[in-house]
Image (cartoon, grey):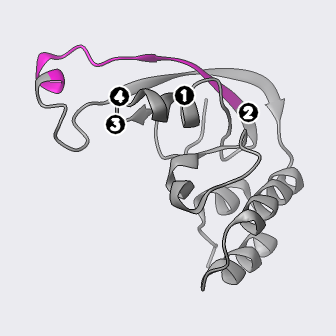
Amino acid sequence: MMHFPLLNVSEKKWKDEDLMDYLLIDEYIYTDSKTFWDTFIHNKLFCDCKGQLYVIDGKELPNSWWRKVFKWLPNVYKIKLRFKNTGKQLSLEELRKYLLARIHDLSDYEGREKWIQFIQQANSYEQLIGGQMDD
């Protein structure tokens, strides 16, 4: 069983403008863009909040008529993703190193150093992927 959110760990370099596209909050995407599917989703490797690795190998298009008719409305056209468990896992340190390397690729901005510090102090997958520190 997957534990959301999931982080795309296939990318060798992140782009500032695409940061939210590397994260899956649930098992759906809300666009039928072929470019988005090919670039960020299909056959990409994702790490869940327990360190398990999954590949997205397909999708289920909505079959209700109203989702198709009103697909132009935000969050109406939901495509369910099909995940395949790879049987592999990333260690906490491997995920931390991956994140730090990707963050260092980004342009320098006001919150970057704080984000790096947060990643260095995180002690769970949930913190690394979801960005929530325990109080």
The residue that disc 2 covers is 53
Callout 3: few (<14), some (14-19), or many (20+) C-alpha neighbours within 10 Å?
some
The residue that disc 3 covers is 30
The circle drawn on residue 38 is: 1
The earlier-in-sequence mark between 4 and 1 is 4
Q: CA distance from mark 1 to mark 2?
A: 19 Å
Indicate which label's residue lies in the foreground, 3 or 1: 1
Secondary structure category for the residue under label 2 = strand
Residue 59 vertical position relative to residue 39 in the rendered view, above or below: above
Regarding residue 5, the answer to whether it shows in the image is no
Callout 2: few (<14), some (14-19), or many (20+) C-alpha neighbours within 10 Å?
many
Secondary structure category for the residue under label 4 = loop
Residue 79 vertical position relative to residue 131 in the rendered view, above or below: above
Q: CA distance from mark 4 to mark 1?
A: 11 Å
Q: CA distance from mark 3 to mark 4?
A: 7 Å
> Which amino acid does the dot numbered 1 rest on?
Asp
Residue 67 lies in the magenta-colored region: yes
- Tell whether 130 sits left or right of 50: left
Callout 4: few (<14), some (14-19), or many (20+) C-alpha neighbours within 10 Å?
few
Secondary structure category for the residue under label 3 = loop
Q: CA distance from mark 4 to mark 2?
A: 24 Å
Secondary structure category for the residue under label 1 = helix
Q: Residue at x 66, y 47 (%)?
A: 49
The earlier-in-sequence mark between 3 and 1 is 3
The circle drawn on residue 32 is: 4
Q: CA distance from mark 3 to mark 1?
A: 14 Å
- Picture quadrant of residue 66: top left
Quadrant in which the C terminus appears: bottom right
Query: Where are the magenta residues, as a range?
Result: 54-68
Q: Are marks 3 and 4 in contact (CB under 8 Å)?
A: no
> Which amino acid does the dot numbered 4 rest on?
Asp
> Which amino acid does the dot numbered 2 rest on?
Leu
